[in-house]
Amino acid sequence: MRQLIILLTILAGISSSAWSQPATLFQNEKVFNGTDQKIMHGVDVLVEDGMIKTIGSGLVAPEGARKIGASGHTMIPGLIDAHWHTTYC
């Protein structure tokens, strides 16, 4: 849970000027897509123009792309423009 909070904090802190880069590749992370209960492990997320372009394993970053190693962290796409509630059981 702590790793998820750290990753979300990092993503929320990236300014819109950072997204104007040609691309950002988040590498080797876990992704929860919110449509089912599965978590994808060891996948990459390619972001271009502030939008997720591709999610998959072994993605190749375009020339000049920013690369962020996210091993051990979980990304939940879509929470950038939304909010969520955390409950500890």
Image (cartoon, helix red, strand yellow):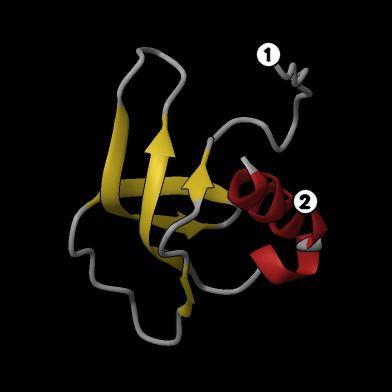
Q: Residue at x 69, y 47 (%)?
A: 8
Identity of the residue furthest to the bottom in this view = 64
Which image quadrant: the C terminus?
top right
- In the picture of the structure, the residue carrying the numbered disc 2 is 12
The residue under label 1 is which amino acid type? Cys
Q: Against 83, is 73 above or below?
A: below
Name the quadrant containing residue 18. bottom right
Name the quadrant containing residue 25. bottom left
- In the picture of the structure, the residue carrying the numbered disc 1 is 89
In the rendering, at what x and y percent does residue 37 appear? Answer: 36, 15
- Count residues near mark 2 (Cα–Cα under 10 Å), then give few for <14, some for 14-19, many for 20+: few
- In depth, the one of 12 and 74 nearer the eye is 74
Circle 1/circle 2 CB separation < 8 Å: no
22 lies left or right of 12: left
Name the quadrant containing residue 86. top right
Q: Against 34, is 3 above or below?
A: below
Q: Against 33, is 76 above or below?
A: below
